[in-house]
Amino acid sequence: MLHKRTIHTFYDLLSTHSTLNKIENLFECESIFQNEFYESSLTGDRRSLADNYVSSLDLTNASELRKILNVIEMFLLENEDNEFIQEDSRWKQLFKLLERDGFTFANGKLLSVNTIYIPKEIEEITSEFNIEHVKKDWERALDQAKADPEDAITATRAMLESTLKWILDDIGEEYDKKENLSQLYRRVAKQLNLSPDQHGEEIFKQILGSINGVVTGLGSLRNEYGDSHGKGKVYYKPSQRHAKFAINLSGTVCMYLLETYFANEKSISV
């Protein structure tokens, strides 16, 4: 999440170092549009204009949060070599506030601080092959890991389900929308030759059986600790480490399934 102070520091930088036209372009290039029913209480045309755009977003929603992050990211990119703006104390302050909120600016991207997560291959492969739902679930999981571990765990399960359904859709295999995660995985595993009974060597049976166990476990973890079910009187709230564990597990399985699918795509038929 982004705290109010972070957003207002960004407004202050825009007010001093941008124009109304540039502010419009920054937001509208990310498909963020003004809220005609909102009247900003901030002073200054540039601050109030930026505030109007942001008011149209639900920043508790991971995909909409990503939009404002993209706006800030583009502003930072455009001014990377601007020594004048970098002498402004609010420039450094914005980076510190973003870091406090759980984001770091690296290689031209604003990313969740996730040094112990699996690498960025998921973002690359989902962008390259336009796997939109998997990409959104991945971004939501990373964005929420620190602020809302329950939602992050739910997102990791959704990412795995989206991956399985995307592969089945791309193959052209029909499935019942009510099928659970394990049932979907069994369908995909059969198509990708990943079922333990499709292999004779014991070591492969063990490894492939373990993947099936991870899939089942992630479904159970989401049911137990995610935010998609009501809670009983006794409830143990998951921490950030639980969310990271789920993200790493789900991300690794999703990457393995997608890479296996693309490696064998031509030989797969329904």
Image (cartoon, helix red, strand yellow):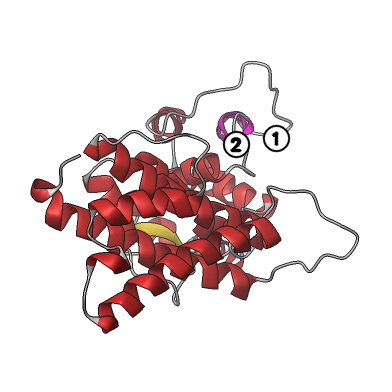
Residue drawn 33% across the image and 42% down it: 166
The residue sitting at the right extreme is 233
242 to the left or right of 257: right
**How far, Cα to Cα, is label 2 from label 1?**
6 Å
Residue 134: image location, x then y, percent? 40, 47
Q: Earlier in the sequence, mark 2 or mark 1?
A: 1
Q: Is residue 88 left or right of residue 82?
A: right
As displayed, is residue 210 above or below residue 34? below
User: From which residue to which does the magenta span run?
Assistant: 47-55
Compared with 95, 162 (above or below) is: above
Q: Look at the image and tell me whether residue 100 can be seen.
A: yes
Magenta span main SS: helix
Q: Say few, some or many: other residues with alpha carbon within 10 Å of mark 1 (under 14 / 14 to 19 / 20 or more).
A: some
Magenta highlight on residue 199:
no
Residue 252 occupies which quadrant of the picture? bottom left
Vertical comparison of 177 with 136: above or below: above
Q: Which residue is mark 1?
A: 42
The outermost residue toward the top is 36
Q: Is residue 49 magenta?
A: yes
The percent coordinates of residue 268 (x first, y second) are: 15, 47
Q: Secondary structure at mark 2?
A: helix
Which residue is identified by label 2? Answer: 47
The amino acid on which the numbered mark 1 sits, given as a three-letter code, is Leu
